[in-house]
Amino acid sequence: MIYCNTRENPVITLGYPGISATPPSVCRTLKKAFNPVDAERAAVLLMAELAVLKLDQQIFRRNLPADKRNGLALTLTGESPSPQGFRYREFHFRLSGRNENPETLLRQFSAIRAGLPGEMFVQVSSIRLKEPVSFVNWEVQKMCFEESSCSGAIVMTGTMELTVQICFAP
């Protein structure tokens, strides 16, 4: 796979990694020690690669810089108890973006939505992550678009609400 963000040294692996022999006590420890910031970093890198966007130039973590008319930002918005059990944590994200060219924004959102692996496992690693992050069950909860004004220009804005499970031992 050719990566857009090579300076991050990304590795994105699709597919079920196989049954883990990790005991429940170790899973609970891994789950407890996991830093949610790593979930956000891994998710934004995955989305950057899906839409062929440069990190910190076209897609950002948490906030789109105020001086940027065009771009996307992914924010971790919350966590819920996972219905999958003690090997998982459930995180909620909001992808928001704006662009002066509505077609560009719609294409970026579509590339991300179509590329999300759904029920397939995807493991993301990079130099910014302490350990690889294993995602499964990406769900788009809501997606909407509207026109607004930004820095004196009319721009298209969009929002996608997402839920995902992070697995600590399949």
Image (cartoon, grey):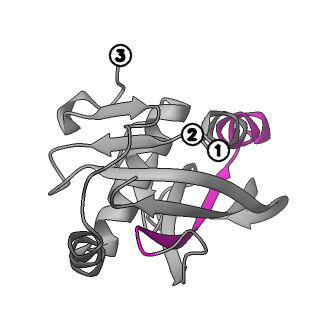
Q: Classify mark 3: helix, strand or loop.
A: loop
How many numbered discs?
3
Magenta stretch bounds: 86-109
Q: Residues within 10 Å of mark 3 (few under 14, many from 20)?
A: few
Q: Are marks 2 and 1 in contact (CB under 8 Å)?
A: yes
Distance of label 2 from label 1 (alpha carbons):
6 Å
Residue type, label 2? Met
Q: Mark 3 highlights which residue?
A: 2
Residue type, label 1? Gly
Q: Mark 1 highlights which residue?
A: 118
Name the residue rendered at 45%, 31% in the picture: 14
Q: Mark 2 highlights which residue?
A: 120
Name the residue rendered at 66%, 64% in the picture: 150
In the rendered image, residue 155, in percent from the top left (x then y), is placed at 74, 54
Q: Residues within 10 Å of mark 1 (few under 14, many from 20)?
A: some
Q: Is residue 153 visible?
A: no
In the rendered image, residue 148, in percent from the top left (x then y), is placed at 79, 64
**Residue nearest the observer in this picture, 83 or 69:** 83
Mark before the other along the chain sequence, 3 or 1: 3
**Residue nearest the observer in this picture, 125 or 60:** 125
Q: Classify mark 1: helix, strand or loop.
A: loop
Distance of label 3 from label 1 (alpha carbons):
21 Å
The disc label shown at residue 66, or none? none
Above or below for 31 versus 156: below
